[in-house]
Image: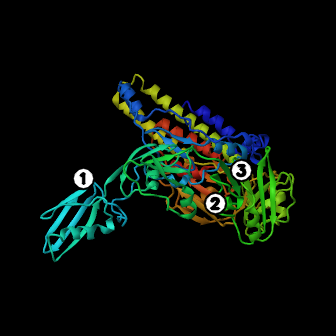
Amino acid sequence: MRYSHLVAACCLFLLPISALAAENSGSQTASTASNGAANFSAPSAGTPNTFISTSSSDLSDTAAGDPNQRSTNQRGTNQRSGEQDQVIAGKSIIPVKSSFQLYVESSTGKLLDVFGRDLFRDVPSTFAPLKAVQVNADYVIGPGDALQIRGWGMVDIDVNVTVSRSGEIYLPRVGSVRVAGVKYRDLQGYLKKAVGKIFKSFELSASIAQTRSVQIYVVGHALRPGSYSLSAMSTMLNALFASGGPAVTGSMRNIKLKRGGQAIVSFDLYDILLHGDKSSDLALQDGDVIYIPAVGPQFALLGDVKKPAIFELKQKTSIAEIVSWAGGFESVAGLKNVIVQKSVDTHYQTVAELQADWASIEQKLAQLEVQPTDIIRVFAPGAAPLEVKADREFVRVDGEVKQSGVFELQKGETLRALLTRIGGTSEKGYVYGTKLKRESVRIQQQAKMDEVVDRYEKDIQTNAKQRLNGQNDPTQAAQVTAELEMQRSLVQKLRSVKSEGRIILNLKDYNAVINDLPDLPLKDGDTVYIPQKTGTVDVIGAVYQQNTFMYQPDRKVNYYVTLAGGVSSTGDKSELYRICADGTVRSNRSSGMGSRVNPGDAIVVPEKIQRGQTFMQSLKDWTSILYQFGLGAAGLATLKAL
């Protein structure tokens, strides 16, 4: 396949240890902020970057010789994960980030979400209140509502009527009754009084069978601005769900409801997100306009808070408030030391170090004001007393260690030195399975992965078009189109595989101890996790009995595969590989299976894939790429689903 040369290049370029080397020699943006913060302006509504691809209908039309009948319909939004996206029917998802998000990412090496945006993820594009829900007692009857009215005793009434445009309903033997403007709680009594003018000694019940629709408009910086028909019980929040909420350029805090040309309320989504307050979420009326203005000043908060994010400023706000917006500190119990840093002239500088009881710390944080475009990070160290410096770096250590928490790095401190300084691992610590993760490595790996997927997607599009040009056999054309769809499915699955930023430490075997760790310099924001010792080995995939087996020293892969009943008739033994506890992946196609299996390893036997030769080669090429990323386990789940 033409793509094999690209795969070979990527496999050499994307080794995690190579990524580490590249990262070490690159820019120091993980701990610095851009000096352009003072001149940074809020993002304006512009045209997002787009990616144009050819859908399967385009290719089918080309094969049929009718390129003019291609579909140009657009749909709403698809599922979004981690970002707000736009999607064109049958085409690729287009991620959209605000300019401030990009600014923060380039300054800190961390991708932060905009606070509140996840509220509008995974919402159907046709969202509206369910018809079966109970009608609010304050609901006002109007033209188009369907009523069910029943009467018994001296009168026999059993009718379903719709309120006319004039606001009236017609009841047999009673006549026309005007009901428009009556609240639902008063409807039964109101009708009973009207019927009582003619009949006596009767009972009557009235309910709403179906509410009317209202036509409203969502304009401004909405993800899907336009006209929407919603249930008359809908509120502003329902309309925002239907339109996808504010776009990346839209405000979350100043959404206006206009009625008759006048703004009657300003809706702040933070009231709902932070306090559950829906008092400003008014019911909609026909002709209402919801206007989403441009986003206001923004700032970023990261560090030891539960939900780091980008927030929008509406008024003067203190650091104490924004920490509460982010869910508070990771651990408030015994909190006696808080460090606040701000991006100032290309560096993080400590603006406050507070050492007191929590009440005093909170009071002092309330005196620190946040400014637009600030990048704030806060720490609550759990290590020894810290010396105040101009530039400071912190790492998090967790798992089976003598001390866990956030620790300040000493100058040039390595992984081995830090773990030794904090007392090493506990008796249950499994050094061979140590996980060292770095955000800058994750971003670099993910960018390369995305680049390769994009090139692969473009390649399969071009290849399919070339194969279809001049193709007169409908059967062959259909086969090419079907294979393209399978390759597109592979592309979408691969986009869901995310890099962890794990740095492979290349330890010898499960007997590794702290002194065997490499003298790898740590960096600000690194996370170190020491897992618990395990005495098992997993065997999964195409075997007769997938299971977890007791670890036996000096046993090889075939021993555990035999315990699992051997490779099944659908298994591909030639593609068997082992995911090691240290993050490496061994297979006969790459570095070999190794001499023996270690505790915590997983042996994977893939299924035989009976597909076209081109598609089969694509899967094997991508398996190699996933190996190089240390994503064997995630890649297995992806490829197995095809």
The residue that mark 1 highlights is 166
The residue at the far bottom in this view is 201
Residue 598 seen in the current view:
no
Distance from Cα at disc 1 to Cα at disc 3: 55 Å
Q: Name which quarter of the figure residue 612 lies in.
A: top left
Please, which residue is most extreme toward the top here?
470
Which residue is outermost to the front? 197
Residue sitting nearer the eye, 462 or 276: 276
Distance between the Cα atoms at labels 2 and 1? 49 Å
Name the quadrant containing residue 190: bottom left
Q: CA distance from mark 2 to mark 3?
A: 16 Å
Looking at the rendered structure, which numbered label has been put on residue 325? Answer: 2
Q: Disc 2 marks which amino acid? A: Trp
Is 628 displayed left or right of 122 in the figure?
Answer: right
SS category of the residue bearing label 3: loop
Q: How many marks?
A: 3
Q: Secondary structure at mark 2?
A: helix
Q: Position of residue 600 (x, y in %)?
A: 65, 61
Of residue 471 and residue 248, the one placed in the foreground of this image is: 248
Callout 1–callout 3 Cβ contact below 8 Å: no
Q: Residues within 10 Å of mark 2 (few under 14, many from 20)?
A: many
